[in-house]
Each structure stands twice: as C-alpha cells, then as structure tokens.
Image (cartoon, rainbow, N blue to C red):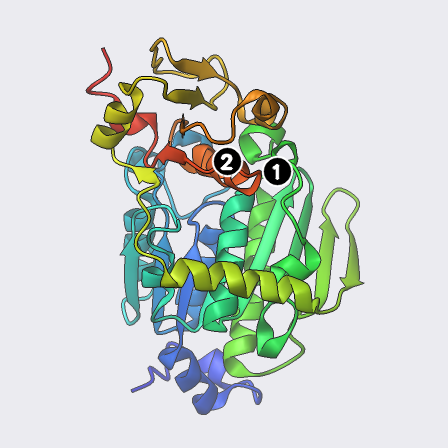
Amino acid sequence: MINKTRYSRQIALDEIGESGQLKLQNASVLVIGAGGLGCPVLQNLAAAGVGTIGIVDGDVVEETNLHRQLLYTLKDCGNSKAETAKKAILELNPEINVNVFPEFFSTQNAFEIVFDYQIIVDCTDTLAVRYLINDVAVVKKIPVVYASIYKFEGQLSVFNYKNGPSYRCLFPEQESLETVPNCVESGVLGVLPNTLGILQATEVLKIILEIGEVLSGKLLIYDALHFQTQIIDFTKNPKAIEKGFINGSLLLNSKKTKEDLSPEAFLEKCNQSGMVVIDVRELNEMPEFKRENVIQIPLSELEEYSKKLDKNQEIVVFCQTGQRSMAAMRYLQKSGFVGVFHLGRGIESLKNQIQ
C-alpha cells in the first residue's frame, strides 16, 4: 500500500502519480559510500520512498566529516557510518527497508553485495573502487549513477544505462595513483558534495520512474566557484566495455580472493622471511608499525618507487583503514606484480596488537 498522505505532493505530479510512487516503493538501490555524496543521496532516496536501500561503507564517523556529511552529529563520532546512516534515514522514513554492509566494497564482497539491487550509486572517492564498481556493473547489467568532487568542482554521469557507455568508456585506464586526490589532501567545500549528491538522487529517481532524459553518454561538470556548468558528450567504446566485462567475469568466476588479509594473516605475512611490507600512509600518521622489512612509501610516491621492486616478489601493503592500500594493491597488480596482498581493514584493526 502507498502512503498517499506522505507522498501526496509527489503523486500530484503527472509524470509520477500513484503508479510512479509504486515503482519507487518496489525499487532497490545500492549506495556505495556513506560520506559527503552518500549522505544526501540516502536522505533524498529515503524521503522519496525508494523501497529498499543498501548502504556500503566500512568507515566510522569522524568530527572532520560533520561539515559536509549531514546525516551525522557529534555524538555519532566513532560509530559505523553505515549503521548510523541507516538509523538516520529510517527516522526520516520508517516505511522503507534498509540493508547495511559495514565494510568496504572490494573484490571479496562485490558480487554478493550487488546481487539484489537494480541501480548502483557510486559515492566513493577511490579510483580502484570505481573501476571495480564499473566491472561488476557491466557484468550484472546494472546502471551506475556516478559523481565525484575536487575542491570547488563536481562531475556527474550515468553509466551502463540501457546498454550505454560505461565508466571505462570515459576513463579508460587508471593512469596514475598521483591523480587520486581525496578531500583530506585537497580540501572540500561542504556544500559541494551535497549539491552533487542531490543531483545523483535525481538521476536515480528518473531511472526508476522512467521519466526525463537520463545523463547517459554525458558528463556534467559543475564549477561551484564561478557557478558554471558544462556538459561533455562521450560515446560507447566497445573495447572498454569488453575489458570491464572480462575483468568482472574473471572475478565472478574465481574463488573468493585471499588478497584482503585479516589482522592475523597480515602479521603472519610480516614475519615471513623476505616479505616486502609497504606502509602507504603519510609519514606522520599514527600508530607506527615498525619492522625490519617495513618500508614507508606514501601512496603518491608508490608509482615511482614500484620501478625498483621485483614483480615476482610477494608484497604486503597497508594503510590506516584499508582504502589506500587497496588502491595501491590494485595499481601494483595492474603493473604486473603477481603476489600482492593488503591489510583489509587497515592498521586500525591492529591497534591492540601493536607493541
């Protein structure tokens, strides 16, 4: 049954009506990332009455998040973003279903997580994860609503919509890890991710309701500082689609990877003779993890340093939470390194075991 009172103003639109509201109620949307982009996406999808929403995020709320991630308050600091976001949007709309995955989206869990969803919303800030989302979505034939931000500029597009272009068609290769700035490094104006997140939610609703013109094959660039917008057209690249399909199919057909190490497996690897262990955090990050075989190479310097490494040597990488180390691992694998592992939940998961 549709709550006609709650959604009366939405139902009043000729393009939506009761039939459209029923489409929203029956829809399932997966939001990957519950940060600056994910918060407004989740708020607006919940308010609109999207029936099932999945939230993927392995991070916890920090005070530095609060100026832009408006689902959270100071009392939420230290708590799971996914669980906290679920509680917040259920308070906004208790009539919807919310599934949480308090973990980072990775090769280990990707296909299990996306299985029941019709649309993916990419609210991540990690290139390696964006390519993973693309490849999984190409195989599953799921549209992806994408946005990214950098300082005062944002981008928005929709991929894999009705056999349209994919993320790889627009960005064929992950050329350099030095081009992966995040808001910690470059800064972010708090209103910008909220603006882009609302636009992402709008595209999701248009896809579900089958109304308007979806931003497929088009990249919207928004310059908040000068209030300018630009739309760039791009076309489907069969080779890029094929690469995504091959990568996704290999992942789907492979056994569950063991490259994401548990804390115990990580320590075991570190104690193995000849193992190269790389800390890709910045030099001043804590807690310290010192071993004779640990090398400190910030992520931005890894590309240059990797030229000195033996591609047949087993390597373990780690960072604070697992996101940068996953990006580093993917880069090394793409560069031809055959035995690369990373600490799945970061050095934070080892706090009680570090001497």
In the image, residue 70 above or below residue 229: above
Question: What's under tag 1, amino acid-wise?
Answer: Leu
Verify CB contact (< 8 Å) between mark 2 and mark 1: no
Residue at image x 44%, y 33%? 325
Q: Which mark is in front, 2 or 1?
A: 2
The residue beneath circle 2 is 337
What is the secondary structure assignment of the residue under circle 2? Answer: loop
Residue 176 on image: x %, y %:
65, 36
Question: What's under tag 2, amino acid-wise?
Answer: Phe
Q: Nearer the viewer, residue 201 or 316?
A: 316
Residue at image x 23%, y 25%? 268
Residue 10 on image: x %, y %:
49, 79
Residue at image x 37%, y 76%? 6
Residue 23 on image: x %, y %:
43, 84
The residue beneath circle 1 is 189
Residue 111 seen in the figure: yes
Residue 320's tag is: none
